[in-house]
């Protein structure tokens, strides 16, 4: 083994534990994780939100938010749907995991509506409606249309 690599390996073994984790954290990329829920009801309809802060030409989309540190991504969906709509959901299977953005990773899960009363967060959301998957409103984000249709966006 190269002498420099031998020294680095020896130093790495010496700093084992929390210091190793700090070095790894400092030397690797940091990402935000955006989590999306494809929320469906018993009739197979999908929940769409008209988002206040999204581009005016594509305001409709699925419930979406960012995971907080230490939060399981399925818990992010439950929290975001509750915050944005007042509805309760049960997360299902992972339907998308996408990286390739500079500072963001995107995750999407199926989710099932289990209860609650619709009460939108008017700061973020202008409107919430249930739609048939084959009758989506104009102005929906294309990646969300693909998720609803069962296609994984590229």
Image (cartoon, rainbow, N blue to C red):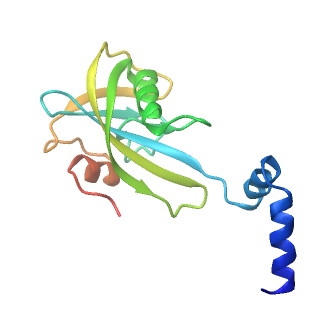
Using the image, determine if residue 81 lies above or below residue 96. Answer: above
Compared to 48, does 147 lie above or below?
A: below
Foreground of the two, 23 or 142? 23
Q: Is residue 55 visible?
A: yes
Q: Nearer the viewer, residue 154 or 56?
A: 154
Task: Find residue 3 and report its horizontal and vertical position in percent.
Answer: 86, 84
Point 82% across, 51% down: residue: 19
Quadrant assignment for the C terminus: bottom left
Using the rendered view, name the quadrant where residue 80 is placed: top left
Residue for point 50% across, 24% down: 123
Say if 55 sits above or below 8 in the image: above
Q: Is residue 57 left or right of residue 21?
A: left
Residue 15: x percent and y percent? 85, 56
Q: Is residue 6 above or below residue 88?
A: below
Q: How many marks?
A: 0
Is residue 93 rendered to the left or right of residue 41? Answer: right
Position of residue 120 in the picture relative to residue 30 (left or right): left
Q: Residue 48: horizontal and vertical position, in percent?
A: 30, 34
Where, by quadrant of the figure, is residue 133 drawn? top left
Residue located 15% across and 34% down the image: 44
Q: Nearer the viewer, residue 86 or 111?
A: 111
Q: Position of residue 50 (x, y in %)?
A: 36, 34
Q: Residue furthest top?
A: 117
Can I make out residue 141 in this image? Answer: no
């Amino acid at each position: 083994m190269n002498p420099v690599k031998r020294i680095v390996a020896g130093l790495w073994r010496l700093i084992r534990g929390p210091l190793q984790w700090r070095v790894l954290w400092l030397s690797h990329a940091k990402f935000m994780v955006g989590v999306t829920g494809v929320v469906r009801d018993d009739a197979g309809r999908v929940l769409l939100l008209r988002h206040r802060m999204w581009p005016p030409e594509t305001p409709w989309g699925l419930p979406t938010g960012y995971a907080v540190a230490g939060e399981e991504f399925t818990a992010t969906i439950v929290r975001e749907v509750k915050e944005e709509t007042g509805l309760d959901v049960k997360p299902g299977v992972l339907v998308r995991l996408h990286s390739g953005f500079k500072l963001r990773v995107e995750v999407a899960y199926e989710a099932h509506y289990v209860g609650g009363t619709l009460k939108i967060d008017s700061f973020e959301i202008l409107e919430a409606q249930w739609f048939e998957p084959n009758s989506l409103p104009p102005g929906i984000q294309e990646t969300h249309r693909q998720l609803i249709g069962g296609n994984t966006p590229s």
